[in-house]
Amino acid sequence: MREIDVKQVTEAVAKLCKDSCYYLPEELLAFYKEAVNREESPLGKEILNTIIENAELAKSKDVPICQDTGLTVVFMEIGQDVHFIGGDLYTAIHAGVADGYVKGYLRKSSVDDPVFVRKNTNDNTPAIIHTTIVSGDKVKITVCPKGCGSENMGAMKMLKPADGVEGIIKFVVDTVRSAGPNPCPPVTVGVGVGGNMEKAALLAKYSLTRKVGEHNKNPQYAELETKLLDLVNKTGVGPSGLGGRITAVAVNIEYAPTHIGGMPVAVNLNCHAARRAEMVL
Amino acid sequence: MAEIKYIKAPLTAETVKSLHAGDVVRISGYIYTARDAAHKRLTEALARGEKLPLDLKDNVIYYVGPSPTKPGEVVGSAGPTTSGRMDKYTPTLIQQGMRGMIGKGLRSKEVIDACVKYGAVYFVAVGGAAAVISKSIVGEQMIAYEDLGPEAIRRYEVKDFPAIVCIDTYGNDFYKEGIAKYSKE
């Protein structure tokens, strides 16, 4: 049994909130630098160059890449041999978010009640926390703040087995095409297939924690990712949705076993500022 | 790239008529910020017959909720938010004399129709390029609804604010044109 003081979790989360909002993942920045050469639209090239300039400026000044520093999504893989001491784990995560957002000059975008009150909580809490228990005595924390421009363009559909892979392809491409400029393309397309309603949605979100260049380990799904990326890039949406070739960075699919009568599919789009930072305790 | 048009805000009727979908512009002068909650309050105030906290005539509204300002900076990161959420309120504000909007994303037919009827333009800025865009904001003043935090109405002094004309007074929509040009479907 390994003991971890929850203070360490608070400090880690606070740092990851700031790091993820200031520093675009290196491999994503490298992707944009390479994509400029492939973009056919002159305006699209200019927009990609602006995205690169913006990421480098934000890093050099320690300021947010985008003003919408999002709701804070926290994935935690907790080794089953870990014992947290010094307080409640979820309270510690929320405290880290509050500390990171207040001291890091990140925008507070969380309202307490979705319908009637809509009062800002003023510290961006609560975080949206997804924990899984794994073997070992380590704790992996991944913080992925996500803005609402892209989140609002997500979609979910309870497809049926007879819809087949064609049904999935149509739904994913339709979702990206109809989202157009709204999710700030080039987007990363997160797709969750299988499970049930909430499982598919969570898989779609989780797929966005992948690094650019990583594919599903199942070759059939990896092939579908490549095919979908090609089809999405044929829509012509392009950078900022003003027309062009580079509509998406990647299509990431995660799948799970499902019911004999179902084939749920969820699409969660991420904007070009796909923020992610992780740490292992 | 196309030639850059340098324009002044507030806009004039002549200026907006000279702009066409796809034009690359740099805006200098004064613009006002407002997003979801401020739009709701502005239109509710109009419905009650109250005077607005700002004169909309010829002015440009920038859809933005900036991040907090770090010490030593003029503003925080301040890129455009998705404009479509303001569609419900926009025709009313255009009727009040608003000449321009800056945001990102698709607009409704009602907004396009109001741009044609009353002479207004919709500019788009690069969403997510918030740190770069902030360089063109050289002054900030709180105007109204300070309790809304990032959603409060502020007046920005801008110098060469980078934008593209998306919807012009002739009813053109540059998103449609741009995407159609590169679609291979």
Image (spheres, coloured by chain):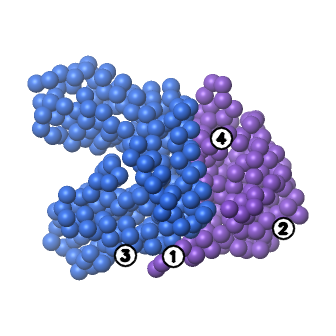
Residues flagged by tags 2 and 3 on a common chain:
no
Give how far across and how far down residue B134 sits, in percent: 65, 41
- Which amino acid lies under the numbered mark 3 shown in the image of this protein? Lys
Q: Earlier in the sequence, mark 4 or mark 2?
A: 2
Mark 3 to mark 1: distance in Å? 16 Å
Residue B36 in sight? no
Label of residue B134 in the image:
4
- Contact between marks 2 and 3 (CB within 8 A): the answer is no
Q: Which residue is mark 2?
A: B17
Q: Earlier in the sequence, mark 2 or mark 1?
A: 2
Q: Secondary structure at mark 3?
A: helix
Residues flagged by tags 4 and 1 on a common chain:
yes
Q: Which residue is mark 1?
A: B183
Quadrant of the drawing holding the N terminus of chain A: top left
Q: Colour of chain A?
A: blue
Q: Which residue is mark 3?
A: A170
- Which amino acid lies under the numbered mark 1 shown in the image of this protein? Ser
